[in-house]
Amino acid sequence: MPITRGQKPVTRSKIPKLGKNECQEEGPQVKRVSSPALGAPTKRPAFSDITNAHKVQISLPGKKLTGKLKKPAAPPKAAEAAAPPKAAASISVAARFRATLKKSSSVSSEGASGKAERPKRVVAAAPAEELVAAAPPAGREPPAHLQRPPIPEQFDVDSEHQDDVFMSPEYAKDIFDHLRRREEQFVLVDYMDQQPSLTPGMRAILVDWLVEVQENFELNHETLYLAVKLTDHFLARAPVQREVLQLIGSTAMLVASKFEERNQPCVEDFLYICDDAYKHEEMIAMETRMLQVLDFDISIPISYRFLRRYAKCAGVAMDTLTLARYVCELSLYNMDLVGERGSKMAAACLLVALVTKQLGGWSPLLLFHSGYHVSDLSHLVLKLHSMMSSPPDDKLRAVRSKYSHKVFFEVASLPLVDIDVLQRALAE
């Protein structure tokens, strides 16, 4: 059973701590039980090989935010609540004017006897056309800069969801085009030169642990990808010590859960899965620092969103999409791929899956919606093939173990496509 959010199981089974110098290539291999096999939450000590968290004092913010709550605004009066909107009010002006005129004309003087009758005042009724506000001309076209270019019929993949408001068929392509433009604000480079206490191997171990956390809490895949992005962007801006690396990763997962999940885990859940290596105040302080370093801009485009969009455009089956997800998730380990755009990474992973499943190459439909030609993806596709053909690291087994399950069509055990077949597909 997965961990119940907000509660701790009665029995806590300790996991062996990571061995000393595990991040070094010559270090001993560590056997870890995979979370899908256990079916239970896995808590891991705070990376004993790269951290000494229980001896580190993390500075906390000195001031707390204070403020008074504003009183809620008084509810509108019944007359105001029942008042028609402005658009309807302008139309009813003529009707109310006629009613007032009729009432005033029917009133006679009923004063005391001997008093002269007050003469009636006749007011000519104005034409209703002058009282009603002129409506804007119907059928006016929006300005040219606001008009969206029409999508050719052969490339239209969203009209079938015209009645589904959750799919946003009118804006689907515009949304992903906006995400592609937004990627330029989140370009990453290899930041390890700015982190003297960290190595690419330590980062890979952290990513491997985040995959297990995502499985144990049954979080969305978008949460995992966003957590890795938040971690990379934070490390690219703020030098840190290895002792707080796991705290940074768990805090990034906490922030990503708040952004992506409907029912996110609480702080105590993350503290428990870290084997209580950190305190509640330390995680809150790290969350504050992370958001400040990132300027509170955490809506980072991730490759998983683009991958689902491209798979929908290609109309592939779930097993093909799962194979592309497996390749994309493996790429999270690789520090050399940190600088790649999420949209380009998703396109390259889907192309690898299409060639592996013998479903053809990059179609004009995918070119239209992704904006990438095969020549734009060839270099990255060859990198992904080299990554998958290299011997697996025994310390990084979470992704391969996850995608070896029947739920994921056991795509991790599929044979790798031959390099010659892949190069022929790239040459077309």
Image (cartoon, rainbow, N blue to C red):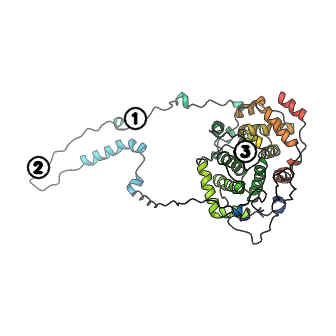
Q: Say few, some or many: other residues with alpha carbon within 10 Å of mark 1 (under 14 / 14 to 19 / 20 or more).
A: few
- Identify residue for label 1: 134
Quadrant of the image containing the C terminus: top right
Which mark identifies residue 192?
3
The residue positioned 38% from the left and 42% from the top of the image is: 90
Task: Give the vertical position of 283 relative to 199 (above or below).
Answer: below
Query: SS class of the residue under badge 1?
Result: loop
The residue positioned 73% from the left and 37% from the top of the image is: 344
> Mark 3 belongs to which amino acid?
Met
- Identify residue for label 2: 116
Q: Residue furthest left?
A: 114
Q: Which residue lies furthest to the bottom in this view?
A: 10
Which mark identifies residue 239?
none
Foreground tag (1 vs 3): 3
Residues under labels 1 and 3: Cα distance?
A: 65 Å
Q: Say few, some or many: other residues with alpha carbon within 10 Å of mark 3 (under 14 / 14 to 19 / 20 or more).
A: some
Among numbered discs 1 and 3, the one appearing first in the sequence: 1
The residue positioned 79% from the left and 64% from the top of the image is: 40
Query: SS class of the residue under badge 3?
Result: helix
